[in-house]
Image (cartoon, rainbow, N blue to C red):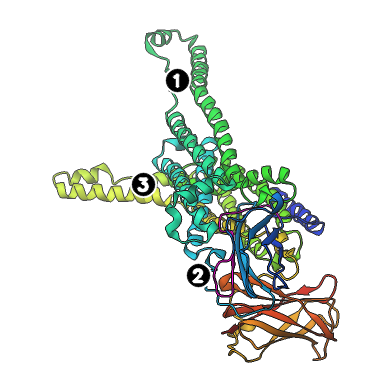
């Protein structure tokens, strides 16, 4: 039996793996998480006359606020007219007007918007009028282009708690309805249900309050700004959060019915007896027939007594399923699944994925409590079947979500989304390993029914005679009572048998790893899908954060000095130019315009040409950039151009090198100016 089950699991995983390979191999374009595709004026461009407006074009529809686009002159003063809107009614654009009579110089555009999948995006770029100039834009002026660190941390924590609370609420309720109806009478199980409900309510309110500051890059003090809350309620995610609060009110009624209906013991069947029974005993010839009739009557009465509870379980199960689907929709309807390709399919599969996650992870928490209460193997066996079905659904829907979010094998390791997906896959694999051990312990528990009797024997109190011997000593009697209570409590806590202890340990490991899965899931929903990250247009190279390549500190430069940066690269291709060094020379290495030279040399030190090379600069601390550099060829393996670096700080230079049609890499390195 066990071998057959293992073969079925292996076959299922193999089929899903092959399906994932086919999907990723044939992936097409998609979108989710808006990206900035173009600007007018162009990034880093020099225009002869002052434009009347600045226009940004995104890859999908965006929502704007009153300060979504701000334009600052070289002195850091705002020169835009405010209240940006959509250009020509196109939802994927943002336009803000400019004041008249703008002087020559370099202008900084700081922008922030909300993409169609409810995630805030932001950044900054520069353009020049007449000729480039130095700029003195302050960090405060660019603050709105980047989310506040504390607000981001609290917002992410609130989303993680919401996922965990939903799993606890839906999973524990399903465990009670499907596996252990008697659990509705247990205090610990009731506390689990109320904990899930209260945590989901609290986290939803917190996310609603923090959403405004999170979108606009303001501080935690704006969390109580009711105008921001009203603005949030007008957005898609605000509508989803409001709907979740209403559903939680209905869920409170559902929990009351769940505990009220299942928490009542079944009406015992009427016991035959009385005078009629005594009189019938006098007839020895018909005693056997009467006993059979009495047994049949008791069975019919028992079924009739249990019928109302079965009907109540069915009705509660249907109501719980409807509430779970509706609650799951409040996440899926305002996230990655709501935009991009195949929305008609991704929405129901996303809800199915969330519900299966809740059945498994929330059920694990309920199982821990049930084992502590001393449930038998039958209850554990029921949950094992539910968990197996949930894992199968999670795997199938997870494969689809991975294909939809990644789009290519390269995005699996080349994007933050792909790397987080690998981490989540590893955590789920650990959970499956722990689940395999749990099934092993369950098989042992089913094969050893005598363990229950062993538990009873180990918890037998001291013989009455021993206590009676000390009946004349009240202090001794109190001491014996305390010892007996401690033995009984320890017996309940430990389960007393190695099999039960092993089962509880493996389930506990599953539950602990489940917490990590929920954290990574939250990070995945906040990360741009791999399709988007790998489809950013020329020059939109993801900014690097951290030490310079190789772990060396960022080179320090003095104003007016030339800096030379060497970036080793390896595209993993088989062409002669697949491996070498990119040398970037920056002069005069200060704020303002800088002359840039790029040289590529192969592994032998000789200049090499490549089909495509792109150069960009990013200031991560200010969300400025990437600022692409228009390169002009100067011979084999050599290019030149001009870079506008408006602020002092730690910059990142990125060189995207493509050595063949499929081999590409982007080495980065930090350097400081000013």
Magenta stretch secondary structure, dominant: loop
Q: Residues within 10 Å of mark 3 (few under 14, many from 20)?
A: some
Q: Secondary structure at mark 2?
A: loop
Q: Is residue 68 magenta?
A: yes
> Considering only order in the chain, which callout, 3 or 2, is on the residue closer to the N terminus?
2
Q: Position of residue 163 (x, y in %)?
A: 54, 50
Residue range (magenta): 60-79
Residue at figure coordinates x 53%, y 45% from the top left: 233
Q: Is residue 100 magenta?
A: no
Tell me the residue that label 3 is attached to: 459
Q: Secondary structure at mark 3?
A: loop
Image depth: mark 2 or mark 3 in front:
2
Q: Residues within 10 Å of mark 2 (few under 14, many from 20)?
A: few
Can you see residue 33? no
| Image quadrant in which you'd find residue 83 | bottom right
User: Residue 140 bears which disc, if any?
Assistant: 2
Relative horizontal placement of residue 158, taking residue 384 as reference (left or right): left
Image depth: mark 1 or mark 2 in front:
2
Q: Nearer the viewer, residue 95 or 519?
A: 95
| Image quadrant in which you'd find residue 434 | bottom right
**How far apart are the alpha carbons under marks 3 and 1?**
32 Å
Above or below, 261 against 280 in this view is below
Relative horizontal placement of residue 31, taking residue 622 as reference (left or right): right
Q: Nearer the viewer, residue 208 or 579?
A: 208
Tell me the residue that label 1 is attached to: 269
**How far apart are the alpha carbons under marks 2 and 3?**
68 Å
Image depth: mark 3 or mark 1 in front:
1
């Amino acid at each position: 039996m066990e071998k057959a089950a293992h073969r079925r699991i292996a076959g299922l995983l193999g089929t899903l793996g092959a399906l994932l390979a086919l999907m990723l191999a044939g992936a097409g374009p998609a979108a989710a998480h808006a990206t900035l595709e173009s600007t007018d004026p162009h990034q880093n461009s020099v225009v002869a006359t002052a434009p009347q407006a600045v226009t940004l074009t995104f890859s999908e529809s965006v929502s704007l606020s009153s300060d979504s686009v701000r334009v600052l002159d070289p002195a850091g003063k705002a020169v835009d007219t405010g209240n940006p809107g959509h250009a020509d009614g196109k939802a994927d654009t943002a336009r803000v007007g400019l004041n008249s009579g703008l002087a020559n110089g370099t202008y900084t555009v700081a922008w922030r918007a909300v993409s169609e999948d409810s995630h805030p995006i932001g950044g900054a770029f520069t353009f020049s009028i007449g000729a480039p100039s130095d700029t003195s834009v302050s960090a405060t002026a660019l603050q709105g282009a980047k989310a506040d660190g504390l607000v981001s941390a609290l917002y992410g924590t609130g989303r993680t708690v919401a996922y965990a609370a939903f799993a606890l609420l839906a999973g524990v309720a399903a465990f009670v309805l499907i596996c252990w109806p008697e659990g509705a009478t247990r205090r610990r199980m009731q506390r689990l249900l109320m904990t899930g409900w209260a945590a989901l309510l609290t986290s939803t309110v917190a996310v609603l309050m923090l959403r405004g500051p999170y979108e606009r890059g303001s501080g935690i003090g704006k969390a109580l700004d009711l105008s921001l809350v009203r603005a949030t309620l007008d957005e898609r995610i605000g509508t989803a959060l409001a709907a979740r609060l209403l559903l939680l009110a209905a869920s409170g009624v559902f929990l009351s019915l769940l505990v009220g209906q299942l928490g009542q013991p079944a009406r015992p069947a009427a016991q035959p007896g009385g005078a009629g029974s005594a009189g019938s005993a006098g007839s020895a010839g018909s005693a056997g027939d009467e006993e059979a009739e009495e047994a049949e009557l008791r069975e019919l009465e028992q079924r009739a007594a249990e019928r109302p509870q079965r009907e109540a379980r069915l009705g509660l199960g249907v109501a719980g399923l409807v509430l779970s689907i509706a609650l799951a929709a409040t996440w899926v309807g305002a996230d990655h699944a709501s935009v991009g390709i195949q929305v008609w399919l991704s929405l129901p599969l996303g809800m199915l994925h969330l519900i299966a996650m809740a059945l498994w992870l929330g059920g694990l928490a309920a199982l821990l409590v049930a084992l502590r209460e001393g449930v038998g193997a039958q209850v554990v066996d029921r949950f094992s079947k539910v968990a197996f079905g949930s894992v199968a659904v999670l795997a199938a829907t997870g494969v689809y979500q991975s294909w939809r979010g990644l789009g290519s094998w390269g995005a699996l390791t080349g994007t933050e989304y792909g790397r987080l997906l690998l981490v989540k896959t590893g955590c789920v694999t650990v959970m499956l390993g722990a689940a395999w051990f749990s099934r092993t312990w369950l098989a042992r528990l089913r094969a050893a029914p005598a363990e229950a009797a062993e538990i009873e024997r180990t918890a037998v109190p001291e013989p009455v005679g021993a206590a009676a011997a000390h009946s004349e000593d009240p202090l001794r009697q109190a001491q014996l009572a305390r010892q007996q209570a401690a033995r009984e409590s320890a017996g309940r806590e430990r389960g007393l048998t190695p099999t039960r202890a092993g089962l509880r340990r493996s389930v506990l490991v599953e539950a602990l790893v489940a917490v990590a899965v929920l954290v990574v899931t939250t990070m995945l929903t906040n990360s741009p899908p791999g399709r988007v990250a790998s489809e950013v247009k020329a020059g939109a190279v993801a900014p690097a954060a951290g030490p310079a390549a190789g772990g060396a500190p960022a080179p320090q430069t003095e104003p007016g000095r030339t800096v030379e940066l060497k970036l080793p690269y390896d595209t993993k291709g088989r062409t002669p130019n697949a491996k070498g060094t990119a040398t970037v020379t920056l002069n005069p290495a200060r704020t303002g315009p800088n002359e840039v030279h790029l040289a590529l040399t192969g592994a032998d030190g000789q200049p090499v040409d490549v089909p495509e090379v792109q150069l960009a600069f990013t200031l991560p601390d200010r969300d400025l950039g990437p600022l692409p550099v228009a390169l002009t060829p100067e011979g084999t393996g050599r290019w030149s151009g001009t870079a506008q670096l408006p602020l002092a700080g730690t910059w990142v230079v990125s060189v995207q090198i493509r050595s063949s049609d499929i081999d590409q890499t982007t080495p980065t390195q930090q350097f400081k100016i000013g």
